[in-house]
Amino acid sequence: MGLRNKDLISIHDLTVGEVATILDVAKKLKRKQKRGEPHRYLEGKTLAMIFSKASTRTRVSFETGFYQLGGHPIYLNDSASQIGRGEPVRDTARVLSRFVDGIMIRTFSHDSVIELAKYATVPVINGLTDLLHPCQALTDMFTIMEHKEVLKGRKLVYVGDGNNMAHSLMYACAKVGMNMVCASPKGYQPDPEIVKNAQEDAAHTGCTIEVDEDLFRAAKGADVLYTDVWASMGQEAEQSIRQEALGDYQINKELLSVARPDAMVLHCLPAHRGEEITEEVLEGPQSKVFDQAENRLHVQKAIMALLMTDDII
């Protein structure tokens, strides 16, 4: 499946075959990296990395990954570029397109990423917006595949705020044929339009995408339990309100007991231990959180290579 020169804004925009290709190439690139085999598919290319939101995992994984692929990443934040001084997104897109081979952006507004992609003539990668986090969700599918081998027919239960992570997991699960339940209280459930889109995708792959207020009913028989912080970046002022509303939506030993005995636990990090997940579960044998964190590197390398060159496995 050719992805050359395409954008990666939402998993909903990808075909089932394109998702499978990303996961397959990630597996091959991870194997090469572990064996110390060179895989400099992006030799001589440059990637502009625009950050309006602070980051650890996104910056380090993209920057390291692009370097390992033989290219040169360029970090841009609001204080070190004209972006933070009010330059229109469409101007930034057209100027950067004449300098670089790809653009990755991590920002608040999803509309800004859509506009960037509209005016850019090089591939644009959504590194995170308030609406979606596609690179993380693709990484999650890859991590589950590593530990469970088969994705189709598995059950993933997302616990907590129906945020950008929940949205992208719905799209990802629908594309790979995984059943998903988002367990969230009223007022914190995912965007109905995204639920509808994911359910339409799921109809083609034979899985189900559901939302349920009942946490323990949702978690019954789960192959994967997944959570994220209750207050995402930019929502810090709502922390106390969110703690009260989401206080019961925690992955702990009691919840784990209703999932399958071999269920795995995922969290996109950073984690607030004792809030959305307990210390004993995060550090327990069923947690694959740090495998998941590492896999951002390998999956994003696959995405960058596939979008920017034809010269790949």
Image (cartoon, grey):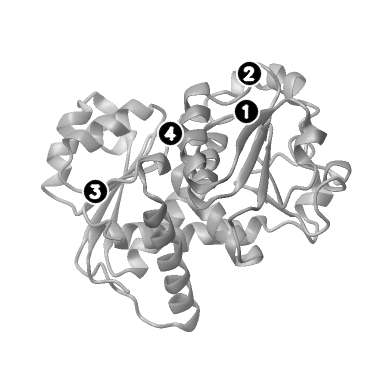
Q: Which sits in the foreground, 284 or 14?
A: 14
Quadrant the N terminus occupies: bottom left
* Secondary structure of the residue carrying numbered label 3: loop
Report which residue position mark 3 lands on.
123
Coordinates of residue 16 in the picture (x, y in percent): 41, 52
**The quarter of the displayed image where residue 255 is located:** top right
Tell me if mark 2 has few (under 14), some (14-19) or many (20+) residues whose alpha carbon lies within 10 angstroms of its own. few
For badge 4, the amino acid type reads Thr
In the figure, 250 relative to 67: above or below?
above
For badge 3, the amino acid type reads Pro
Coordinates of residue 248 in the picture (x, y in percent): 81, 28
For badge 1, the amino acid type reads Ala
Report which residue position mark 1 lands on.
231
Residue at 44% across / 35% down in the picture? 53
Residue 279 horizontal side relative to residue 140, left or right: right
Q: Which is more foreground, mark 2 or mark 3?
A: 3
Quadrant the C terminus occupies: bottom left
Disc 4 to disc 1, C-alpha distance: 14 Å
Report which residue position mark 4 lands on.
129
* Secondary structure of the residue carrying numbered label 1: loop
Residue 56 shows up from this direction? no
Tell me if mark 3 has few (under 14), some (14-19) or many (20+) residues whose alpha carbon lies within 10 angstroms of its own. many
Disc 1 to disc 3, C-alpha distance: 31 Å
In the image, which disc is placed on residue 238?
Answer: 2
